[in-house]
Amino acid sequence: MTETPRPRVKYVIGPDGSPLTIADLPPITTRRWVIRRKAEVVAAVRGGLLSLEEACQRYTLTTEEFLSWQYSIDQHGLAGLRTTRIQHYRH
């Protein structure tokens, strides 16, 4: 039995509340991951703009790295994505 692919959404609501499209996502060449960029990629995957596999391939991320961003947002909000405060949030 073949699985029907989910229709791709045209936009999702970004972390700042504005519409986020593929064109609005961080560039593929991104190497400096600030809070906003991480949150945009997480919002895109959660909203169906990108699949987890597409996001990891596009940005050369490991699944674990992406999932850690998602977990940090769930547990601590956007502040959890701050690399300078990461030890504060981890137990």
Image (cartoon, helix red, strand yellow):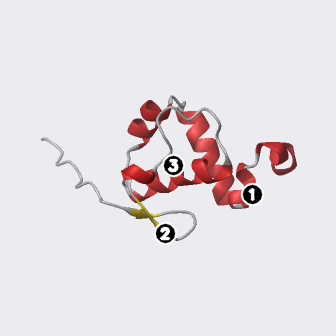
Identified by mark 3, the residue type is Val
Horizontally, is 66 left or right of 20 in the view? Answer: right
Identified by mark 2, the residue type is Ser
**In front: 3, or 43?**
43
Q: Residue at x 38, y 44 (%)?
A: 51
What residue would you read off at disc 2? Answer: 18
**CB under 8 Å between callouts 3 and 2?**
no
Instruction: Decide if residue 91 is in sight here.
Output: no
Q: Which secondary structure lies at badge 3? A: helix
In which quadrant of the rendered image does the N terminus lie? top left
User: Label 3, label 2: how many angstroms apart (C-alpha)?
Assistant: 14 Å
**CB under 8 Å between callouts 1 and 3?**
no
What residue would you read off at disc 1? Answer: 79
Looking at the image, the residue that sits furthest to the left is 1
Upstream in sequence: badge 1 or badge 3: 3
Q: Residues within 10 Å of mark 2 (few under 14, many from 20)?
A: few
Q: Residue at x 58, y 49 (%)?
A: 37
Q: Residue at x 16, y 49 (%)?
A: 4
> Which-is-in-front pick, marks 3 and 2?
2
x%, y% of residue 89? 82, 51
x%, y% of residue 63? 53, 34
Residue 41 marker: 3
Horizontally, is 53 left or right of 79 in the view? Answer: left
Q: Would you place residue 20 above or below residue 23 in this image?
A: below
Q: Residue at x 39, y 50 (%)?
A: 23
